[in-house]
Image (tube, rainbow, N blue to C red):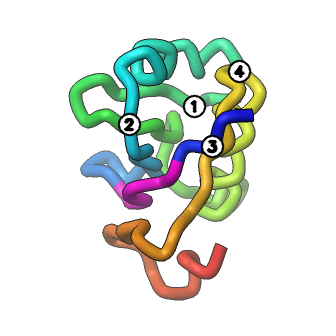
Amino acid sequence: MDVIQILEVGIDKKGRLFIRPVVTSLKNKESFEFVYRAAMAIYWDKKEEYFHASTAEDEDMPYRKWFEQIVDAVKSELGFSLELSKATIWTGISNQFNKV
């Protein structure tokens, strides 16, 4: 399974968790939009170039669960493993969450 490093994890303007991957190949990027087919409420934003949750955090789906859901959807539908690195940027997320 191919590994794609996570460039950034953050909260967008709508309060949704996003994961921005390091995109090294146009071929990889073109397939990202099909993540919705996993039927896990995860989508690819072409303009912002990140995967995002369909809704903001709530008590049933805290950001930690959305993070896991995005990673699982990408793995099951696209065949890529998203992985954190020491270089991953955390935007608008508390220190408690980024200990994933």
User: Which amino acid type corresponds to the residue marked 2 in the rendered image?
Assistant: Val
Q: Tell which tag, 1 or 2, sits nearer the viewer.
A: 2
Residue under pointer 3? 3
Q: Any mark on residue 23, and which?
A: 2
Q: Secondary structure at mark 4?
A: helix
Q: Are marks 4 and 3 in contact (CB under 8 Å)?
A: no
Q: Secondary structure at mark 1?
A: strand
Q: For this rendering, which residue is in front, 70 or 41?
A: 70
Quarter holding the C terminus is: bottom right
Above or below residue 22? Residue 78 is above
Where in the figure is residue 13, as x and y percent of width and height? Answer: 25, 50
Looking at the image, residue 1 sits to the left or right of residue 74; the answer is right
Extent of the magenta region:
5-11
Q: Tell which tag, 4 or 3, sits nearer the viewer.
A: 3
Q: Tell which tag, 1 or 3, sits nearer the viewer.
A: 3
The numbered mark, 1 or 2, whose residue comes first in the sequence reads 2
Give the overall secondary structure of the magenta segment: strand
User: Which amino acid type corresponds to the residue marked 4 in the rendered image?
Assistant: Glu
Above or below residue 21? Residue 95 is below
Residue under pointer 4? 77
